[in-house]
Amino acid sequence: MELKEVVFLFENASIIKYVGLFFIFNLSIIFIEIIVDFFIAKKRRWKDTGANVVIFGINQLLEKTIVGSIGVILLIPFQWLSLFEIPMNIWTWFLAIFVADFTYYWMHRLEHEHRILWAHHSVHHSSEDYNLTISMRLSIIEGLFEWIFLIPMILVGFSPFQAIVGLVLVAQYQTWIHTEHIKSLGWLDEVFNTPSTHRVHHGSNRKYLDKNYGGILIIWDKLFGTFEREKEKVIYGLTKNINTNNPLTINFIEYLNIWKEVKKCKTLKDKFRIVFGNLIWKPEYFKKND
């Protein structure tokens, strides 16, 4: 094995180690918040918390098997198409996280704007609670297709490994912001995604809908007109709540809702718009029948 290959493997092992430590840290603060909330008797839907933990367990099981490898495997052909190769070093890791954060903003925004994508992302928004376990409440199937949004990173020269790890770090950063225990952080709320700015994102209040999509940086929302400050009390959950703690129902109820509406559509065009259009569009005859 050449020296270059040894260095490459060593650097990758170090990155994986740091990602693992970050993961353990996040689990630790989630556990600490659960203990604190229990002893101070903070109002909390404990069955909802249990559902979040179960969903997290299912996700971990799937990610450690087939789902976790799908992204790497399917992104490799796009690496062959790239005309560039960005080397992995400390500076390009910072760049990869920055680009992954920009990618995350647009992925996240599209998940709110197109119903077929909202079907999996709504899992994360369906709780009427707001605590650190909400960061665990993620669709068990989103890993099957979120890798698609990393294709541009691969085509400009990032390796699949660096792109995926960059996106994972953007996601892991967001664990600590799912809490009510931390209030406004002043100027940091204007630059970074913080508990205050992310509470807004989880609000079903009309003025908070579709705001603050950023992962690490909130400046993307300021650049693209989706920023909103926390000014009024946040009402968490969906505009129409699902009222269930069943992990499987939580994960698939919106797909079922889409299917029911598709069956009611009279034209192929309407079926297409129900699936791929925005969240609120319905054919006029739906409204007449309601």
Image (tube, rainbow, N blue to C red):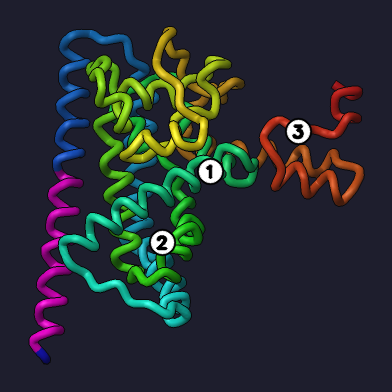
> Quick one: which residue is furthest to the bottom in this view?
1
Residue displayed at 13% across by 69% down: 11
Question: For the magenta stretch, what is the residue range?
Answer: 3-24
Residue displayed at 41% across by 61% down: 67
How many circles with numbers are drawn on the protein?
3
Please determine whether, in this image, residue 64 is positioned above or below residue 26: below
What whole-number distance in Å separates the C-alpha atoms at marks 3 and 2? Answer: 32 Å
Which quadrant of the figure has residue 286? top right
Task: Please provide percent x and percent y for residue 221.
Answer: 45, 34
At label 3, counting other C-alpha atoms closer than 10 Å, the crowd grade (few under 14, some 14-19, many 20 or more) is few
Task: Please provide percent x and percent y for residue 202.
Answer: 45, 25
What whole-number distance in Å separates the C-alpha atoms at marks 1 and 3? Answer: 18 Å
- Front in this rendered view, residue 168 or 96: 96
Inspect the image, locate mark 2, and give the three-letter code of the amino acid beneath it. Answer: Val
Task: Please provide percent x and percent y for residue 224.
Answer: 50, 37
Looking at the image, is mark 3 or mark 2 nearer the viewer?
Answer: 3
At label 1, counting other C-alpha atoms closer than 10 Å, the crowd grade (few under 14, some 14-19, many 20 or more) is many
71 displayed left or right of 257:
left
Q: Quadrant of the C terminus?
A: top right
Identify the element where label 1 is drawn: helix
Please determine whether, in this image, residue 265 is positioned above or below residue 15: above
At label 2, counting other C-alpha atoms closer than 10 Å, the crowd grade (few under 14, some 14-19, many 20 or more) is some
Q: On the image, numbered disc 1 is attached to which residue? A: 120
Identify the element where label 3 is drawn: loop
Task: Please provide percent x and percent y for residue 10.
Answer: 10, 72
Inspect the image, locate mark 3, and give the three-letter code of the amino acid beneath it. Answer: Trp
Q: On the image, numbered disc 2 is attached to which residue? A: 67
What whole-number distance in Å separates the C-alpha atoms at marks 1 and 2? Answer: 15 Å
Inspect the image, locate mark 1, and give the three-letter code of the amino acid beneath it. Answer: His
Q: On the image, numbered disc 3 is attached to which residue? A: 281
Who comes first in sequence, dot 3 or dot 2? 2
Residue displayed at 21% across by 23% down: 34
